[in-house]
């Protein structure tokens, strides 16, 4: 194995190990020493890849965000109308919520850290703003194609769509077996879609 | 001051002090010793009121939940229709989000702890279920009075209403000055209300 490949493998091992530890014990209670021990990686190798525990944490978030953005793009591509695209996104996200395993409590941890540390907050707020803009653009496109009523405020509607997704994700973290999350998410987004529909 | 009154005052001081510390530094990073020091209360007095840090934490949540339930009851009382009652609740909650100060990041901390510790989870899931039942009952009443379409599923709609509230609360914690939260909350709940309206 080339050095380069071994480096990528070490980085991925550190990401996987820390995801498990952060999710289980929390960010504050997890030390670099413990991550290194569980990952069987030396401290020297750790700091070769990440300047700090916080930088590793932010890299985890980047990985997660990339996967969500990729998912949404796939969903939007095959739909013919905006309501259809939103429904497909809801189905995909809801399906993820049903499959909740170790990976999601880390989001709660991320939100907690972001509310507390400016460095995490700044890193977090840019992609979040990107999501809002993306959904506001979709709602505007829905108005333009005649699916949604012109009286709908695209920015406020984008906040509502985002909040349904965040709120259901939170409920799914909280109560993984509490509901069929895919069905609940589709039905929730559908209510908002119906609320936006052209009134004429 | 009678012993009894002094006891209540000590308990309230411990609640206020720990709320500030948990919100600022997190649950894990806050020790009983530091709470006692900041509150100027002895460890003996602390353990007279609370068996553990976790019990104090759960008492904070009880206080918070009581205030929210009280708020919702006030809102519902003066409304003539279910959509009106829901709008008034949205206005009240949204007003709270605008006034976010030290008190809300604690909720994130609570959700994080609940996702991790069965004792917190059990304490948390009962009132949460109560909220869901409450909103499902309101949606059913809205169908019965003819405001909402009979095809609406009250339980799923209750999850949607709750998720809009939770999601916007999360966004408001994240970005306190990012929007006029009262207006955004009313508009979000209004979209869901419009989505449920009678289709005939």
Image (tube, coloured by chain):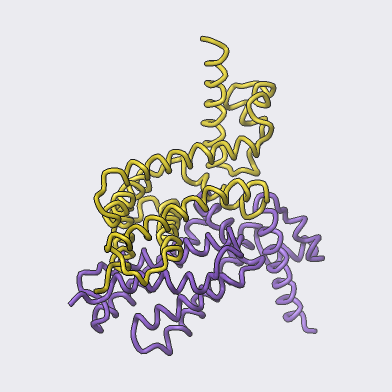
Chain colours: A purple, B yellow
Relative placement, left or right, of A135 versus B127 is: left
**Residue nearest the viewer, comparing B10 with B105:** B10
On the image, the x and y values in percent for residue A87 come to 42, 79
Residue at the spot 32% in from the left edge and 61% down from the top edge: B144
Residue at the spot 27% in from the left edge and 63% down from the top edge: B146
Residue at the spot 26% in from the left edge and 48% down from the top edge: B79
Q: Quadrant of residue B82?
A: bottom left
Q: Quadrant of residue B42?
A: top right
On the image, the x and y values in percent for residue A165 come to 46, 67
Relative placement, left or right, of A127 versus A155 is: right
Residue located farthest toward the left when viewing the structure as drawn: A200
Q: Quadrant of residue B143?
A: bottom left
On the image, the x and y values in percent for residue A38 come to 79, 62
Vertical side of B40 occupied by A47: above or below: below
On the image, the x and y values in percent for residue B117 come to 67, 50
The C terminus of chain B, quarter of image: bottom left
Relative placement, left or right, of A196 versus A17 is: left
Residue at the spot 47% in from the left edge and 58% down from the top edge: A122
**Residue nearest the viewer, comparing B65 with A70:** B65
**Callout count:** 0
Vertical side of B198 occupied by B34: above or below: above
Residue located farthest toward the top when viewing the structure as drawn: B1
Residue located farthest toward the front when viewing the structure as drawn: B144
**Residue nearest the viewer, comparing B163 with B82:** B82
């Amino acid at each position: 194995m080339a050095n380069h490949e071994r480096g990528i493998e070490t980085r991925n091992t550190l990401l996987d190990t820390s995801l498990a530890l952060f999710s289980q014990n929390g960010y504050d209670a997890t030390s670099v020493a413990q991550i290194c021990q569980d990952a069987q990686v030396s401290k020297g190798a750790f700091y070769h890849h990440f300047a700090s525990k916080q930088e590793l944490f932010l890299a985890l978030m980047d990985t997660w965000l990339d996967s969500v953005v990729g998912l949404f793009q796939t969903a939007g591509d095959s739909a013919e109308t905006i309501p259809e695209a939103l429904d497909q996104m809801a189905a995909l996200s809801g399906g993820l919520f049903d499959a909740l395993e170790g990976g999601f409590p880390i989001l709660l941890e991320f939100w907690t850290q972001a509310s507390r540390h400016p460095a995490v907050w700044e890193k977090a707020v840019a992609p979040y703003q990107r999501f809002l803009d993306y959904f506001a653009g979709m709602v505007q496109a829905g108005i333009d194609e005649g699916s949604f009523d012109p009286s709908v405020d695209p920015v406020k509607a984008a906040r509502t769509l985002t909040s349904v997704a965040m709120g259901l994700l939170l409920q799914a973290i909280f109560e993984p077996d509490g509901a069929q999350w895919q069905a609940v998410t589709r039905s929730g987004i559908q209510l908002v879609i119906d609320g936006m529909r052209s009134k004429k």
